[in-house]
Each structure stands twice: as structure tokens, then as C-alpha cells.
Image (cartoon, rainbow, N blue to C red):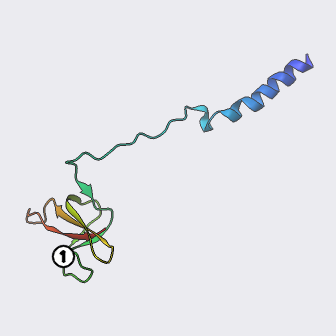
Amino acid sequence: MDWRWTWVLGLALIGPAALPAGGGERRQPELRRRQAREPLLATGAASLKASPRRHAPVLAQLEAGEPLELVRSWWSPSGRRWLQVQTAGGPAGLARRGWLAG
């Protein structure tokens, strides 16, 4: 009778080691790709510039989460990436277009 308890205890100690935490199924998160017409979202505060230069005048300050539409991408001769974007609309409802350092 002692060997039965030893077997049950051994199975109880070894069996859960193969299960993930909580004993649930192990699933990979689903990837969701951005659709072509979905807006990009500003990840943080950024300056919308008049041209793709570091010292260009700032047109507006963008807030985190502001929707943007990518117009084009450009690499400067120095190797810096710039994104020309258009905002959904400002306080007056007018869309703004400018450059962000990428």
C-alpha cells in the first residue's frame, strides 16, 4: 500500500511541471497588421516641422495618440529618416501636413 501513495505523490509532483502557469493552454498572441487606410497614431509628444530638417520651424506640437496619415517617407543625406504626415484636423478642423523625424 505504501508504493501506491509513493506513486500518486510522485505523479502529483512531476505532472504539473509540464503545464504552463495556471494549467491553461499556451497560446501565442495574435498578430494584427495595420490595414492600408487605418491611421498611424503618434506614440508621444512630437514636433510637426515645416521641412525635413532638424532646425526647421515647428508648425505644431502633436499629442500622444493623435491620428496621422503617412504621406511619404524620406531619408536625408545624413542618414536620418523623415516621415511626411498629415493630421486628421486641428482645432479649426483643418488638416495639417508636416514632417516628423523617424
39 relative to 83, above or below? above
Count of numbered badges drawn on the protein: 1
Q: Which residue shows up at 8% across the image and 65% down it?
A: 92
Q: Residue furthest top?
A: 1
Q: Identify the residue position indicated by label 1 in the image.
A: 51
Within 10 angstroms of label 1, few (less than 14), some, or many (20 or more) residues?
A: some
17 relative to 98, above or below? above
Q: Which residue shows up at 62% across the image and 38% down it?
A: 21
Residue 7: image quadrant is top right
Residue 60 position, x and y percent, is: 19, 73
Residue 80 position, x and y percent, is: 32, 73
Mark 1 residue element: loop
Q: Image check: 31 left or right of 61?
A: right
Residue 11 position, x and y percent, is: 77, 26
Three-letter amino acid code at the position of disc 1:
Ser
Residue 18: image quadrant is top right
Q: Which residue shows up at 45% across the image and 41% down it?
A: 29
